[in-house]
């Protein structure tokens, strides 16, 4: 058994098509919307946050005074605008922007928890129907770090799996037969075995999952992973996550709580 640590990589995010966005704003709101774009687009901290603001302002035609007769003043900065969105709980516009993470060396315990958050997500996970492991890699929970019986049991499973797999002449098999046998053999492997998964979610979903999965009552591995997720999105999208604060827990992980929960 090889002990490993979960790893979190932010590998993708929403990107603007600026030339079309500029044309759309000019067509939709004329000089007022175009003027708003000219004075704000370079100050945006991320494409995703700016797209959310564009979508939100379209709802009320609030790119500037004079476009909507009912609007007599607007919030001048993106920070003020998104802060007000969070306070009001207008979470739907956060769904316009998404982020993609790769979670490596996480367990199937983790992925079974993660896939329960299915709204607003896309998931691609390493298939153990196709991937035949050479060894068992595993993140060991703190409670079991020094428990020899725990590691001995995993070692026995690894040895037993190796003996089963060695019975077959894999080099002479058709790929479809390999797939069938790999699928059958994986059933004896533990849920704690490491796997890899790519997870895409919109910012409304990410806010919710961070809140739920960094709770002091959450399973420790998923709290460990989403503590890191929270650190990364807070740094990269400071306006969307401006109301999140971290409290360090006794085990060294962090619990993140937003001021505005119903977003």
Image (cartoon, rainbow, N blue to C red):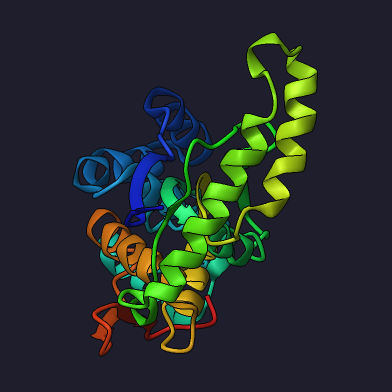
Where residue 120 sits, quadrant-wise, is bottom right
Where residue 210 sits, quadrant-wise, is bottom left
Q: Nearer the viewer, residue 13 or 199?
A: 199
Residue 197 appears in the rendering: yes
Could you say where residue 33 lies in the image, as x and y percent from the top left?
40, 43
In the image, residue 97 above or below residue 94? above
Could you say where residue 106 lies in the image, as x and y percent from the top left?
45, 55
Where residue 131 sits, quadrant-wise, is top right
Residue depicted at x 52% and y 67%:
70
Residue depicted at x 57% and y 40%:
162
In the image, residue 258 above or below residue 184? below
Residue depicted at x 45% and y 26%:
23
Q: Nearer the viewer, residue 124 or 62?
A: 124
121 to the left or right of 104: right
Residue 71 appears in the rendering: no
259 to the left or right of 263: left
Q: How many marks?
A: 0
């Amino acid at each position: 058994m090889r002990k490993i640590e979960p790893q979190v990589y932010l590998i993708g995010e929403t990107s603007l098509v600026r030339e079309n966005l500029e044309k759309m704003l000019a067509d939709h709101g004329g000089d007022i919307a175009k003027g708003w774009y000219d004075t704000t687009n370079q100050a945006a901290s991320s494409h995703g946050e700016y797209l959310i603001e564009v979508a939100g302002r379209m709802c009320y035609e609030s790119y500037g005074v004079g476009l909507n007769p009912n609007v007599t003043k607007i919030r001048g900065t993106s920070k003020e605008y998104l802060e007000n969105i969070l306070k009001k709980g207008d979470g739907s516009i956060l769904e316009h922007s998404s982020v993609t993470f790769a979670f490596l060396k996480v367990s199937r315990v983790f992925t079974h928890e993660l896939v329960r958050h299915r709204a607003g997500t896309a998931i691609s996970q390493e298939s153990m129907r196709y991937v035949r492991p050479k060894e068992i890699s595993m993140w060991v929970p703190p409670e079991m770090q020094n428990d020899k019986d725990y590691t001995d049991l995993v070692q026995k499973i690894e040895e037993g799996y190796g003996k089963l797999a060695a019975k077959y002449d894999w080099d002479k098999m058709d790929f479809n037969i390999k797939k069938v046998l790999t699928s059958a053999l994986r059933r004896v492997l533990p849920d704690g075995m490491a796997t890899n998964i790519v997870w895409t979610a919109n910012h409304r979903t990410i806010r919710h999952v961070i809140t739920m999965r960094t709770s002091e009552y959450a399973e420790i591995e998923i709290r460990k992973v989403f503590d890191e997720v929270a650190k990364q999105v807070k740094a990269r999208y400071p306006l969307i996550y401006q109301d999140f604060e971290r409290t360090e827990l006794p085990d060294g992980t962090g619990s993140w709580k937003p001021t505005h929960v119903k977003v």
